[in-house]
Amino acid sequence: MNMITFFLVGLLVHVVFFISIFDIYFTSPLVHGMTPQHVSLPPPAKRLVLFVADGLRADSLFKPDINGTTRAPYIRNIIQNRGTWGVSHTRVPTESRPGHVALIAGFYEDVSAVAKGWKENPVEFDSVFNESRHTWCWGSPDILPMFAKGATGDHVHTYTYPATMEDFASTDASKLDTWVFDEVKVFLNSAKQNETLLSKLHEEQNVFFLHLLGIDTNGHAHRPMSTEYLDNIGLVDAGVAEMVSVFEEFFGNDGKTAYVFTADHGMTNWGSHGASHPSETLTPLVAWGAGVQTAQKATSTSQNYDDDFLKEWGLETYRRVDVNQADIAALMSSLIGVPIPLNSVGVLPLQYLNNSQHFKAENMYANAIQILEQFKVKMEQKKETTLSFLFTPYQILTDSKQMDFMRHARELIQKGQFKDAINLCDLLISQAMEGLSYYHTYDRFFLGSSVVLGFVGWTSYVVLVILKTHASLRKPPISRDKMPGRSVGKVFLCIGLLVTLFLLLQASPFTYYIYCLLPVPVWYSVIKEFGTFVDLIRSIPSLPLSKCCGYFVLVTFGIELLVVSFFHRAMLTLGLITLTLWPFVSGLHRRAKSRSVSWVLSCLCLAAFPLLPVVGREPNTNYVLCAGALTLFNSFSYLWSSHGHVGLHKRDRRLFIGQMIQVALCAYVLASTHSSLQLKQGLPLFNQLISWSTLVSSFFVPLLTSTRLFHRLLSILLSLICVYLLLSTGYEALFPPALSWLMFVWINMEQDAMDTQGASSTTELHRIDFAETIDLTKIRQLKLDDIRRSYFFVFFIIIAFFGTGNIASINSFDPASVYCFLTVFNPFIMGGLLMWKVLIPFIIVMCTFETVQVSTRLSSRSLFLIVLVISDLMALHFFFLVKDHGSWLDIGTSISHYVIVMSMTIFLMLLSVMTHILTSKRILIGRRLKMHFK
């Protein structure tokens, strides 16, 4: 198999492995075909007003100021006199879209659905808005269209402000909330002159949704502890009070309006959200009005909470009722008498209701049947896609037990034993939820086993290819009983046909065929290379066993260290400190003393970064200016030292000087932008133009320079650092210069290592040209020391990924990083820029590795195969760490680490091509222009 074919096959295999984790653990929980469950009793409210304060933390609302005064007096008064309150517990990811889906539709959206769209529904689902008679919404264009498009008919009406108003550089983001309040007043006033609209507004089962984004925007721009954020809470509180007065007056104080005030997610102290920190998952919930229980004094049995929030918030004498975020959809449905959304997994919080026990029992019964309907549909779907003799039903809820539950609950309600009926319905809901999870994960073990089988087979094949190509095992032995190739092919062909037939009979999805059939050709390739394994066994007596075992132990320890570093970043520091010993263990310190000292110092310098705080730091442009100055100093030093012996062309020197000026300009633009935003003067247009032009030019400017080794590497580094400076807010700007120092020393140390081992025909580094045609006669075979080189590369890649932040956590990204490019909210452009920031250190290491391969005269395929084996072993390790049981957070953490390693491997394969182009290709614009003018 040639290199191109191997590259394409490897890329395809890893893409399949990458996608598989989403099919195994992140499939959509939605099912269709259920019947809406109506309650025959009249509801307490004719209409409901839902306030969602986007990004509002529970403590920010409930906790008094230092002087003891509350920043939300109206909401505080509701808690103390008129309503019921508590904490709503959200789930990861704590983002606006899944938060609103949980609030209004009652289920927790899967990750794949979030990735498919932001403003619209990638999948159909029911919601409180859809079940209502009419819903009017005011707020963000990023949230409201999602529910309007998903509704049947045209009874969901949305009013949104322009997307350009969502500007993090705005002088006052609270104007987003003021716009909502003003528009509601204008709407209700206009309705008085419109008989048709007035008639609709006075109908029952109406919902009014006010989405308030100002708090979230101010939190991102100024942090939750800022005056802007806290003042915005006061503005929202006053706005809610005004809205209640307006609604009550409009409907003639009929006492038939219910109000719910909550938030979709919270926010960390550093102004981000998306992960599982309590400041992100704990949001306020306050309900009052028609059908809602009024304020109740706390009892010793009703306040059994493990936290100290009640005392901290000064609310220990008022009953607190916590809920899961999805429960709010069931509460709103019950208040206005509409069916609970069909896909809801929320449980009706009865303590929020002020109604008869009969009403509560009937609503709990409807809630239980609604969830049981989902269970029955899910069970039927699984029956249809599983052979009858292989199907294992959920024994706790068989068909007969379901009927018994339903009949018994209905009998209890008819007899007036409402409390017993409620308890029975609560038990049914719990068991139905467990059954839903059982059928939702029914195929997980089967798919996981198929993926692991393919993974192990692929890794085994790569190891065998390495041995066959570089371990001198290609000479056939004198005698060997070989299984004929055709017979092996026929056996695996039969296996493939049987697997296909099995999946066909089960009507399995298309992706199941990929996951289950992939191991067949992979293991066929392994069996075909079985002779290589036999040769290895026979050649064991001639191998340096002690050295091989030593390398095996070290690599195993190294892989475990990398795995642990995903959970504890300080392990990277330990690894870098360990790397400082390499020159002394290998004996290189005797040959290259100064470089050995430089290696130790650069490792120790880089070792400090994993110990620094990932999040919670305030922007500090002084670090960025220092990073720019350090980059300029290093570049100037190289140009001065190369003046004599490297032979730097005038054209290259002019390009380098131009890039150095660009570095200084980018540092200035970053400092200028943040200063302008602090003064609330917005993003200067000049700075924005410079930022975008720098980003675009960074992709082709290095191609204009010489392909001499250090010339090209310096140009790539300057281009990348320019962009990195624009995307930095603090100490992370110093990371690329520190990493580049270590990479420069590594290149030189590897050359010294080759000289120490007596490698012939070594070329001085400054004479190496990336564009030179490789002399195939000088390409050497792999040695044990190349395993160390490959491990160094993987280790440095992990350092590049995690050196200044944990990319497995969404909340470690600071939105301020992209303010030089844009300040108006755009999740996809912002996400792309942040991802490029993560990849820049990655590319620096990749270019260094390309240089090491060229300087050590080893083919790209050779070292890359070892890198694939190491990264695949890490991914397989994380795959085994994922367990079906345990908290969602623990499962999600292991999955995210698996996804990162697989993404890293795919990026390695793709960026290896990009790196080759960056280092070896050149655009001869100057020469062509000169010829044109001649």
Image: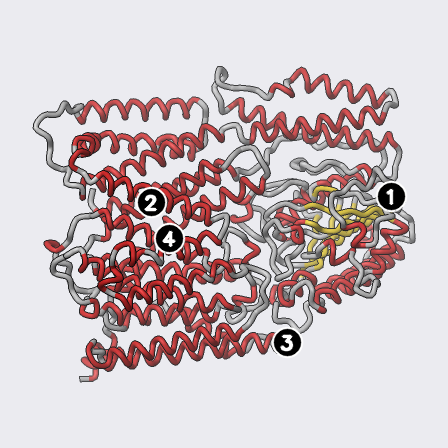
Picture coordinates of residue 436 (x, y %)?
Answer: 61, 29
The span from disc 1 to disc 4 (Cα, nearest Å) is 55 Å
Measuring from the top left, give residue 13's x and y in whole percent: 34, 41
Q: Is residue 643 above or below residue 886?
A: below
Q: Which residue is mark 2?
A: 555
Which amino acid, mark 1? Ala
What label sits on residue 65 in the rendered view? none
Whichever of labels 1 and 4 marks the residue nearer the N terminus, that label is 1
Amino acid beneath label 4: Phe
**Residue ID at (44%, 48%):** 900
Distance from Cα at disc 2 to Cα at disc 1 = 59 Å
Q: Position of residue 91 (x, y in %)?
A: 63, 45
Q: Helix, strand or loop at disc 3?
A: loop
Q: Tell me, yes or no, if residue 513 can be seen here.
A: no
Reading the image, the residue beneath label 1 is 298
Give the label, 2 or 3, closer to the camera. 2
Who is closer to the viewer here, 451 or 269? 269
Q: Secondary structure at mark 4?
A: helix
Front position among marks 4 and 2: 2
Cα distance between the residues tagged 3 and 4: 42 Å
Which corner quadrant holds the N terminus? top left
Q: Earlier in the sequence, mark 2 or mark 1?
A: 1
Residue plotted at (46% across, 75% down) = 626
- Dot 3 corresponds to which residue? 680
Q: Is residue 39 visible?
A: yes
Which residue corresponds to mark 4? 795
Q: CA distance from mark 2 to mark 3?
A: 53 Å
Report which quarter residue 819 is drawn in. Answer: bottom right
Mark 4 burial class by Cα count in 10 Å: few <14, some 14-19, many 20+: some
**Image depth: mark 1 or mark 3 in front:** 1
Sequence-wise first label, 4 or 2? 2
